[in-house]
Amino acid sequence: MDKKWEIVFDYLMYLIRENKVHPGEVLPSQNMLKTKFKYSEQPIRIAFNKLIELKIVKSVNGKGFVVQDKIKNNLLFSFRELFPDSINKYTYFNEINCDTKFSKISGYQEGSVLLEFHCTRMSNDKKVILFQISYLLKEKFIGLTLEKLNNNGLMHYIENNTNSIVSHATKKINYVKNVEDILDKFDHFDESIDALILDEGKVYDIFGEVLEYRKSYYKPEEFEWNFIEWRK
């Protein structure tokens, strides 16, 4: 059973997703929500704090909780934002069973049914940027097809066809040699590629559940990692 704050959060997200409350407008007050759900103040406050944390709303003195521009949310996880002029080609869409070994590395429960698909990302001049293998929990993505992926991509599907909200991702970067088997998965034959940069990670929703486990293999010359390192 959902926690009380999650029920309130889902309701507020429904108002935002369905444009019942537009960017710049104010969400129902805490007192209104206390009356509607017959909850105490604590779960309602937690729900609003989660929305603030995700930069979906902001608290404005004298007004309440104001919805921010949705376009600014979750761009970090969209390859279309990282490579705006590139092209996705999704291939190999299949179901697999999650065994013990894969459960440990992916975070999915052993015995669950997963969707596996492959994606090649290319520049407009057909230059390969990366190869990606993704795994999703089938029960969360009923209705997802290869055609839908090729039309709009995975993040578009999550945002428009599921109740999930992307929160954060974890990453592990490695240098990989002996890449013939990887390239074979994508029917890509290029003797000049003798190594790839592996970006292995998981994408999580706001409740800490794994939405996607993926392995992105970059051509070394296409890999660039820019970040700021703060002293603790």
Image: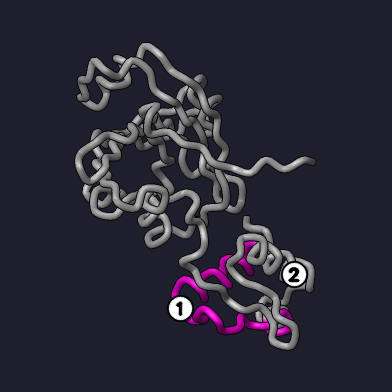
Q: Nearer the viewer, residue 213 or 144?
A: 213
Residue at 33% in and 32% down: 131
Q: Quadrant of residue 3?
A: bottom right
The residue that label 1 is drawn on is 19
User: Residue 6, percent across and down?
Assistant: 63, 61
Give the left or right position of residue 170, taking residue 184 as reference.
Answer: right
How many other residues sit within 10 Å of disc 1, few (<14), some (14-19) or many (≥20)? few
Give the left or right position of residue 50, taking residue 12 as reference.
Answer: right
Looking at the picture, does residue 105 appear above or below residue 14? above
**Is residue 77 within the magenta segment?**
no
Amino acid type, callout 2: Arg
Quadrant the N terminus occupies: bottom right
Q: Earlier in the sequence, mark 1 or mark 2?
A: 1
Which residues are drawn in magenta?
A: 6-32
User: Residue 119, percent across and down?
Assistant: 30, 37
In the rendered view, how is the structure colored? one colour
Looking at the picture, does residue 46 appear above or below residue 216? below
Amino acid type, callout 1: Asn
User: Residue 229, percent across and down?
Assistant: 67, 40
Looking at the picture, does residue 195 appear above or below residue 74? above
The residue that label 2 is drawn on is 45
Q: Nearer the viewer, residue 167 or 13?
A: 167
Q: Quadrant of residue 160?
A: bottom left
Residue at 47% in and 20% down: 175
Q: CA distance from mark 1 to mark 2?
A: 22 Å
